[in-house]
Amino acid sequence: MTDPAQHWNERYAKEEYAYGEAPNEFLKEQLLQLMPGRILFPAEGEGRNAVYAATLGWTVEAFDISAEGKKKAERLADKNSVVIDYRIGTLDQMNFKENSFDAIALIYAHFPAGLRADLHKRLTTLLRPGGTLILEGFSKNHGDYQKKNSGIGGPPNPAMRFDRDEIENDFRGMEILLSEQCEAELNEGFGHRGTGSVIRFVARKV
């Protein structure tokens, strides 16, 4: 079985950006409502969202397990004349301090089911009081969309997809500003193309 880092390195080794160079539309909409500060992008892949945040004036930190993803992200940052602090590794290998970020963005950051809840709780501790958590990812129902269109992408394992109740429980104690499951029309590179079922969640740390 291919290990996760190898899987993502192979996907990101292509010249084309797997999910495009433009930011996720939901993230874009949410960031435009916030004052720039310090933001963290876990599982950031090729950097499209981190680079966009940097163009808005955010101080951006990101991490991923893919060295190829980091190369693409830094190339995109250079292209857009911004700087991002991008590290390779897992959350366990980072030295982020608690209460140090104004926002955390989890955009299609699908962690293994057994790790997800703990990772989400630990990420919450990194937010400052008043900080914002922004999440978009594929829902449990997304499998029906994958059967109709393999180009929409998303984890093949339903256990890695999101359920609203699970997400709300992962981030319990936060003030929920938005929690919904909806259809989304995605046009993000060759990796997300077509209609899918997503969970969108925004919460503020109290």
Image (tube, helix red, strand yellow):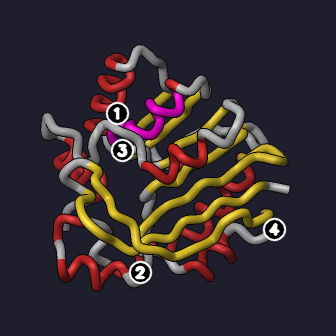
For the residues marked 4 and 3, what is the alpha-carbon distance in whole angstroms? Answer: 29 Å
Residue flagged by tag 2: what amino acid is it? Answer: Ala
* Contact, mark 1 vs mark 4 (Cβ under 8 Å): no
Tell me if residue 162 comes above or below residue 24 in the rendering.
Answer: below
Is residue 53 located in the magenta-colored stretch of the structure? yes
C-alpha span from label 4 to label 2: 24 Å
Give SS at disc 4: loop
Compared across the picture, whether 120 is left or right of 28 comes to right
Q: Which quadrant of the structure image shows residue 119?
A: bottom right
Q: Residue at x 28, y 53 (%)?
A: 187
Q: Circle 3 is placed at which residue position?
A: 45
What segment is highlighted magenta in the picture?
A: 46-54
Q: Quadrant of the C terminus?
A: bottom right
CA separation in Å, label 2 and label 3? 21 Å
Q: Which amino acid is tagged 1? A: Lys
Comparing marks 1 and 4, which lies closer to the viewer?
4
For label 1, the residue is 70
- Apparent side of residue 115 relative to residue 141 in the rendered image (left or right): right
Q: Secondary structure of the magenta portion, mostly?
A: helix
* Alpha-carbon span between mark 1 and mark 2: 27 Å
Closer to the chain start, of discs 1 and 2, is 1
Query: Dot 1: what SS?
Result: helix
Q: Residues within 10 Å of mark 4 (few under 14, many from 20)?
A: few
Label 2, secondary structure: give it.
helix
**In the rendered structure, does residue 177 fall within the stretch colored magenta?**
no
Q: Which mark is drawn over residue 173?
A: 4
Residue type at tag 3: Gly
